[in-house]
């Protein structure tokens, strides 16, 4: 059997502000932005440039109970892990773009990591795994 995760849904307040952050600030590629008339919503998909794994569906909260989870989809834990081939290049670029890092860079036996917030407050790891690690870029 062969399976993979193709998309992860991320609740957002507004499609355009989310695209501006994920594509404009983080540098992701906009893979799709199409209107879905049957559901009266947009299908917006982004992925890190050069990425080959799962993409992120930017999903506007459609119910009041969903709105409470914008920025807190994992109860305060790190939600997503942005793996990079050059930690310091990306850390310096994101810092220059005023991305808020809440945990400074640290080197561990598996690699280098720092934690940042996205525009809604979700926590992300910026991560460069050591060469030879099974998930290294």
Image (cartoon, rainbow, N blue to C red):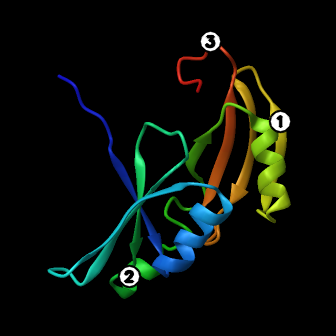
Number of marks in the image?
A: 3
- Label 3: which secondary element: loop
The 10 Å Cα crowd at callout 1, few under 14, some 14 to 19, many 20 or more, is few
Name the residue that disc number 2 marks.
65
Task: Give percent across and percent down for residue 63.
Answer: 33, 85
Q: Residue furthest bottom?
A: 64
Q: 126 or 51, which is in the foreground?
A: 51
Distance between mark 1 and mark 3 Cα atoms: 19 Å
Residue 132: numbered disc: 3
Answer yes or no: is residue 68 visible.
Answer: no
Proximity of marks 1 and 3: CB atoms separated by less than 8 Å: no
In the image, what residue occupies the spot 38% across and 87% down?
A: 64
Proximity of marks 3 and 2: CB atoms separated by less than 8 Å: no
Q: Which residue lies furthest to the top in this view?
A: 132
Location of residue 107 (image quadrant): top right
Among the two numbered marks 3 and 2 on one chain, the one whose residue lies closer to the N terminus: 2
């Amino acid at each position: 059997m062969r399976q993979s995760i193709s998309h992860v849904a991320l609740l957002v307040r507004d499609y355009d502000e989310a695209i501006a952050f994920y594509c404009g600030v983080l540098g992701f590629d906009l893979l799709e932005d199409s209107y879905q008339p049957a559901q009266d919503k947009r299908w917006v998909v982004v992925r890190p440039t050069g990425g080959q794994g799962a993409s992120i569906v930017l999903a506007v909260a459609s119910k009041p109970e969903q709105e409470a989870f914008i920025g807190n989809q994992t109860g305060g834990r790190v939600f997503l892990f942005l793996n990079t081939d050059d930690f310091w290049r990306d850390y310096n670029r994101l810092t220059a773009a005023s991305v808020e890092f809440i945990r400074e860079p640290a080197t561990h036996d598996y690699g280098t990591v720092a934690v940042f917030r996205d525009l809604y407050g979700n926590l992300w790891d910026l991560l460069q795994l050591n060469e030879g690690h099974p998930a290294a870029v």
